[in-house]
Image (cartoon, coloured by chain):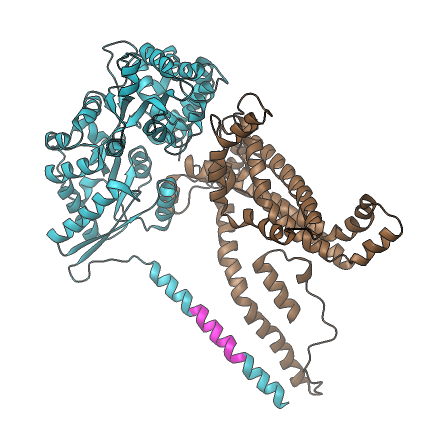
Amino acid sequence: MRNQRANRRRWRAPAIAGLALIAGLGVAACSSQSGSGGSSSGKITLTEEDYYTSGSANTFWNNAFAEYHKLHPDVTIKRSSVPESGYVPHLLNQAGGGSLPNIVMVDNPYVAQFAAAGALLPLKSIGQFDTSGITPTLLHDGMYKGKLYAVPPYVNTFALSYNKKMFAAAHLSPPQTWAQLISDAKKLTTSKVYGFVTTMPATHGQAFWDFAPFLWTNAGADAIEHIDSPQAAAALNVFVQMAKDGSMPKDVVSWQGSQDTEYFESGKAAMLLNGSWNIPTFNAVKGLSYGTVELPTRTVGQRLLVPTGGETFGISDSGSTAQQQAALAFMRWLMTPQEDAKAAIQIGDLPTVKSAVTTALPQEDPAQMKPIETELNNGGTERTEYAGTAFNSVSVTIGNAIDAAVLGQQTPQKALQSIAGTVNSSLHSGSGS
Amino acid sequence: MRRIIDGAAAAVTGPAGPEQVAQPEPGGRPGIGKGPAAAVRRRPVFRRILVPALFIAPAVLYALVFFGYPLLYGIIMSFEQFGLAAVVHGSGPFVGFANYKAIFSDPVTFLALRNTLVFTVVSVVFQVGIGLAVAVLLNRTFFLSGLLRRLVLVPWLIPLLAVGTIFSLLFGTSGAPINTLLQKLHIIHAAIPWLIQGNPALIAIILVNIWAGLPFNIIVLYSGLQDIDPRLHEAAMVDGASPVQKFRYITLPLLRPVLLIVIMLGIIATVKVFDIVWVMTGGGPNNATQLLSSWAYTQAFNNFNFGQGAAIANVLLVISFLLALVYLRSLRTRDAR
C-alpha cells in the first residue's frame, strides 16, 4: 500500500511539470509571433529582406542602412537576406502569415502579382513620394495598373560581350546583325571553344529573358500576344541555328548556375549574353580581354528592345502606419541622386534617377556600360507590360518551347505554334490567381 | 503500459524495424494490489488511463500540430481557388472539385504519375537487388571487408542536395566526366544528352536515387543476414548444397521478413523523393522528369496555383497512405504468424 501511494506521487509531479512546460512553451511561441518592432519610445525598428546574400549588392545595402541610421538615429533597419532560389516561396510563407518585412525587395516580374494580391501598398497612399526625377520608362518596373507599388533604384539588362583576342585572331569585328552573329559564332567555334554561350533553362523565366530582345525587336513589344508569328519563329531560329551548328552547346537549356560566365571567363567561349552586373567580376579576371556591344538586330538600324531587369523595393502592408511612413522616408533618401548613383556604381547597374546617370556611369566601366545604357534608354521594356500577373506561367511555357526548339525536338515554328493556345488563354484568363 | 509507449514512440519515429515491434506483456501490470473494495479498484483504472495519457500527450500534440494541421490545411486548400491573393488573405473561394478536374485534364499530371511509378519501381528493384548482393558479399570476411562495410555508408552521409548538385555536374553533356569516361572506354560513341533530353534525364535521376538509397538497403539486409544461424549453412554444405541452393533455400526464406520491410520502406520513401529531381532537372526538360512531388511544387510555387498543387500533393498522399496500409497489414500478418 505504501508503495502504491509513493508510486502515485512519483508519477504525478513529472506529469504536472510536463504539462506546465508544454503550456509555457505554447504561450511563449504564440506571443513571439505577434509583430515585433514597434515605435515605443519614438524609436522605430524596420525590417527589410532581399536576396543579396553575397557580393557587392550585399555590401552596399549593409552600408546604406548603417549610413541612414547615422543620419536618423531613431530609425533602425534590420536587414536579412535569403538565397535567390528560395526567395519567392519564402516571401509567400511570410505573406501567408502576415509577417512580410516592412521593406521588401521584389524582383520586377513579380511586382504585378504581389501588388494584385495586396501584399504591397501603393507608395502614394502612405505619403508623399516624388517620382519626377526618375526616368519614366524605368519607373514602369514598379508599377501595376497605373499605381507605383515598388521603387526600382537601379536597372540592368544584358548586351553582347566578346573575347577581343579571339576576334582579333579571326579578323572579325563584333556582329551587328543576326546573320553575322550566327556566322561569327560558327567561325570561332573550335574543339575547345564555343562561339556563343548563355543559360537558357525554361524555369524562372530564364530562357524567356534571353529570348526577349530578339523576340520583341522583330515581332514587337506585344509579341507574346501572337507568339506563333513568323517573326517570332525567325527570332527563335537564331538560337536554334547556333545549336545546330555546334556553336552553342545544347547543355545551355539545363545550365542553372553561372556556367556561361565561367566558360567566358576561362576562355572557353567567344561570345556571351552578358548582364551588366557581371562587369565588375569580369574586370577582376586576369588575362580576360573583352569588349561589349549592343545586341545584334535582324537588320541594321532596327529598334532594339531589351528586357529591364533589376530588383524593386516595396513597402508591405504589415507593420504600423509609423513604420510604413518611416520606410517611405528611407525610400525618399535612397532615391536622391547621390545615393542612387552610389547604389548603381557599387552594384554595377544603371541608376534610375535621371541626374544620377551622369555621375554614375563614368565611375562604372564606361566602355562596357555604354551599350547597356544605350539599350536601356532606347528600348528598356518591362516584361510584365503585356503579360501582367500571368507572366510567371507564360514565361515558362514559352521557355519550354524555346528549349524544345534548341534541342532540335521541334522546329521553331512548330514549337511556338504548339504553345500559342496555352499562352493566349493564360493571358486572357488573368491566371496565376 | 510499455506497449502504449512503444506504440507512441513508433508513431513519432515512423515505421519500426522488426526488433522494435511491441511484445505483448504477460499478465497485468506488476504492483497492482488485489484490493477488495470497489473504490480501490476504480482508482487504479483511472490512474491506468490518466498517466499514460499524459505521457503520450506531447507526442499526440506534436503529431496533431505538425502533421495533422498541415494535412488538413492542404486538403482544404485543394478545394479552394488558391492563388497569391489567397496566400495573403489566408484562404480562397470554395470551388469544389474544380482543382482536381483541372489536374486530371492536364497531361503533365499523368506524365508525373507515370514517371513516379517508373522511378519508384526501378529504383526499389535495383536498390534491393544490388543491396542484397553487396550485403551477401560483405557477410563474408575478406581483406578490407571491415573497411568496406563502413565505406558503403558514405552515400547516406551526404545530404541529398549536395548529391544532386554533384551528379548534375557529372551528368553534363559536352565534356562532362561521365560522358568523357564512357567515350574513352568506347562504351558509347556520341555523348549522351543526360539532363537535356527526357528519357536520359529520367535514367540519370533514377541512377542517382539508386546510388543514394543503397546504404540503407545494404545495412538492413546485412543485419538480416547476420541473424541467420551460420550452422544452417554449414549443415546444408555438409548435405552437399551448392552456394546457389544455399541462397535459394536457406538465406532467402529466412530473409523474407527483412526483405519485405526493406521493399515496403523503400517504396514509401521513394514515392516522395523531391530533392534529387529538383536539383538535377527541376522537373524538366519541358516537364519530362516531373514526379508528383516536383509537379506539386512547380504548380504551387512557380505557377502560383496553390489549389492545384495541393490537389496533386493529395493524390500523392492517397498513394502513400494506401502503401502504408499494405505495409502495416503485412506487419500484422507477420506478427500473427
Q: Main secondary structure of the magenta part?
A: helix
Query: Residue B168 vs residue A196: left or right?
Result: right
The vertical placement of B202 against A79, above or below, is above
Within the magenta stretch, is there residue B274?
no
Q: Which residues are magenta?
A: A12-23
Residue A343 in the image, given as x and y percentages of width and height: 18, 39
Q: Is residue A145 visible?
A: no
- Seen from the viewer's position, the closer of residues A230 and A355 is A355
Residue A253 in the image, given as x and y percentages of width and height: 43, 26
Residue located 32% across and 29% down the image: A265
- Seen as rendered, the residue at the extreme right is B239
Colour representing chain A:
cyan
- Seen as rendered, the residue at the extreme bottom is A2
Colour representing chain B:
brown
Query: Residue A253 vs residue A35: left or right?
Result: right
Residue A252 in the image, given as x and y percentages of width and height: 42, 26
The quadrant in which the C terminus of chain B is found is bottom right
Query: Residue A87 vs residue B286: left or right?
Result: left
The vertical placement of A332 against A9, above or below, is above
The vertical placement of A391 against A79, above or below, is above
Residue located 13% across and 43% down the image: A333
